[in-house]
Amino acid sequence: MDGQLRQRAASAEGATPAPRSAFGTDAAGSAATSPARLSHIQVRAIVLSLMMAMFLTALDQTIVATALPTIGRQFKNVADLSWVITAYLLSSTSVAPVFGSLSDIYGRRAMMTAALGLFLAGSLACAVAPNLLVLIGARFLQGLGGGGILPLVQTVLADIITPRERARYQAYFSMVWVTAGAGGPVLGGVIADHLHWSVIFWINLPLVLLAMAVLLPRLKTLPAHHRPRRLDWAGGLLLMAAAMAFLLVLTWGGNVLPWRSPSLLALIGLVLVLAGIFVWRAGRVAEPFLPLPLLAGPVVPLAFTAAACAIGTMVGLTVHLPIYYESVYHLSASEAGLALIPIVALSVPGATAAGRVMMHMKRYKWISVVGLATGAVASLVLAAATPLPLWQLLALLSIVALGLGTTFPVAVVSVQSAVARHQVGTVTGAMNFFRSLMAAIAVALFTAILLAELGGPSSSLDQLDLASATSQDMVAAFRYVFLASAALLAVGALAIVAMQERPLGDAPKPGVDVGE
């Protein structure tokens, strides 16, 4: 019936029916239609609204960091400050697959409303927090909303843009993410120095309300790709609990607790038990929260691996390079921050290049293979030749960033094109979930490498006496960090090589073919 209405509408407008494209199959098992044929004005309005929503969640991941000392002084509690960051990380990571799955059941607009609403409530609670404990709880609430926004943004983009064009838009969103992530610490520091720290959260309120006012009405025009079904709440809670416990292991291991301490070993055991129960349940429930077959096949697991290795390398280097800059090149904190620009910002040109290749070439995955392999070689050069003059180090890091940036559009578009339309939200949320876990693993791995090489009595990298570590010691330690980066990028390249390359749908012509 819906198809007949679309045919009549298309005929009335003098247009042809919407073309078929390689999206997999729909709920009935037939070939799924391409995204709704919206006008350029409609698409532009929705994309700009999505960018605004993504900017919010990217900004709040970093804006708080530079204000932490000010917050600690006001609440007279410095020991627990790290939980302001950790609480957001725990909730935002664990909730990503939940919102992705829920959007496939209840629709994109309903879940975007929930995500933005939680983010708004969390921001308000942070702004009025009377003590650090309340602030940590409010950050957890804020993370529940922020963690849902990113997969929903990518899912909505998949609803309105065909795979071949979507790669170009992924580069635009990468630019927004990098801009917000890089600008967050600067803005947070300015606010903490010249205003009250709570302004960091107050400014979210008008921005969220504006995003809701602009985005939510436009989401009514989206086609209905969701499929109502019974939600496996138990499976979702098991996955969230396992993810939180795993992140706590990575956060506390070798930092708060020794790796061989009974408490940490018990926490590792809890992770294994929860994960085992989740897998057991997913194999026995008629409609599991995260269908395990969805994570199999020649595309999804390999694309997940490549994207996870790329983001893990980027985050791991971003967290640890300031130590290298300050110890070996004797840069100030602000100068070290500026020296991070290549590894963070130059991933955007890489993503843009990959998007262009995917738009115009049938054989598209080679751009990511070349990019990751080149990044791996550059990391090997860093490991072998360091210490280098600073400009040469930055040049090689730029090559690494360009290379790993090519992976993001290839992986996201390939994954979304490999599943049925009513599963795009689920698989997108799962991809963001595994990427975040890999970022945490990479940070823990690089930290463990530095602690093992630099030694000393301290139990954490933050407490390491850098003044006593010579530049030669730091250089020797970072050789292994760069080797680990090369290994991650090489694994990502091999994953893309093994990934099946499926044809992408062409971009639709402007029209009015919009679903209910």
Image: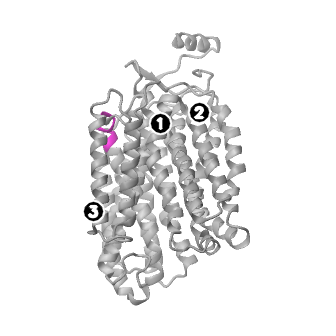
Could you tell me how far apart the alpha carbons at marks 3 and 2 are, in whole angstroms?
A: 42 Å
Which amino acid does the dot numbered 1 rest on? Arg
Secondary structure beneath disc 2? helix
Q: Read off the residue under disc 1.
A: 164
The answer to which quarter of the image holds residue 44 is top right
Q: Nearer the viewer, residue 388 or 111?
A: 111
Instruction: Work out whether 347 lies above or below 254.
Output: above
Mark 2 Cα within 10 Å, few/some/many (few <14, many 20+)? many
Q: Nearer the viewer, residue 153 or 84?
A: 84
Which stretch did the figure color magenta?
293-301
Mark 1 Cα within 10 Å, few/some/many (few <14, many 20+)? many
Which amino acid does the dot numbered 2 rest on? Arg
Res 265 label: 3
Q: Disc 1 or 3, which lies upstream in sequence?
A: 1
Residue in the image at 35% along x and 45% along y = 303
- The x and y percentages for residue 321 are 44, 72
User: Any magenta on residue 121?
Assistant: no
Residue in the image at 31% along x and 64% along y = 264
Q: Nearer the viewer, residue 20 or 332?
A: 332
Res 109 label: 2
Q: Nearer the viewer, mark 3 or mark 2?
A: 3
Instruction: Work out whether 205 lies above or below 451.
Output: above
- The x and y percentages for residue 348 are 51, 55
